[in-house]
Amino acid sequence: MAAIQTSLPEGTEIELWWADEARIGQKNKVTRRWAKRGTRPSAPSDLRTQWAYIFGAICPKKGKGAGLVLPYCDTGGMNQHLKEISLAIDPGAHAVLILDQAGWHTTPKLEVPANITLMFLPSKAPELNPQENVWQFMRDNWLSNRIFFDYDDILAHCCQAWNKLVDQPWKIISIGMRDWAHGF
């Protein structure tokens, strides 16, 4: 972080962002449910295989998010997502975007906007990325235990869930803040 800060004009604010992708589809997860003791609540399940990907990024300190719902998880989608994140960064600020080392994050074909610097997490350490906890929250509350009728229904529910999250900045702050990451 110190190297990034020294490469920027003096007084430039750094926003710490976290990003990841989640696949949401018809083979949906069954999550815990509240039920009367001694009963076994039913949960719908589907064997069809359509899905979409939510590209999501959060800035927990400011309670901001930037996301897209796309049909593929690839370099093209990541380039679109970087543009979306770039628009959400405060004017004059610079973002350090922390993400895993997926192939579409590390490829030289990635077009990184000037107001973003990428920083990669160690391999096999998803627990370090609070965006993983965002996916768990969204699945537990808005995306699991349901049957999606078709691809358009998947898109609609993913967009609705992401927009509902972004409309609750306090939720992004409570899920995403990490003392070890925001103490620089």
Image: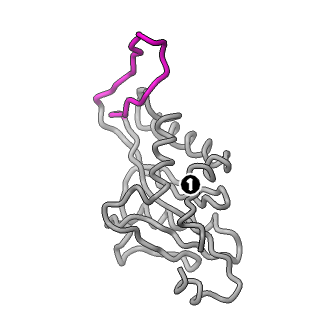
Q: In this orientation, which residue lies closer to the viewer: 17 or 125?
A: 125
**Residue 110 or residue 39, whichever sits in front:** 39
Q: Residue at x 64, y 61 (%)?
A: 61
**Residue situated in front as seen by the camera: 43 or 147:** 43
Q: Is residue 34 magenta?
A: yes
Residue 132 versus residue 152 in the image, above or below: below
Check disc 1: other Cα within 10 Å, few if <14, some if 14-19, many if 20+. Answer: many
Q: Amino acid at mark 1?
A: Gly
Local secondary structure at mark 1: helix
Q: Residue at x 54, y 83 (%)?
A: 4
As drawn, is 159 to the left or to the right of 47?
right
Location of residue 135 with respect to 118 vertically, above or below: above
Q: Is residue 33 above or below residue 36?
A: below
Q: How is the image coloured?
A: one colour
The quarter of the displayed image where residue 150 is located: top left
Residue 154, quarter of the rendered image:
top left
Q: Quadrant of the C terminus?
A: bottom right
- For the record, the magenta segment spans 26-47
Pinpoint residue 107: horizontal percent, then vertical percent. 34, 74
Most foreground residue, 122 or 169: 122
Q: Residue 49: x, y in percent?
A: 30, 36
The residue positioned 38% from the left and 13% from the top of the image is: 40
Percent x, y of residue 98: 48, 67
Residue at which label 1 appears: 176
Instruction: Give the left or right position of residue 49, taking residue 174 as reference.
Output: left
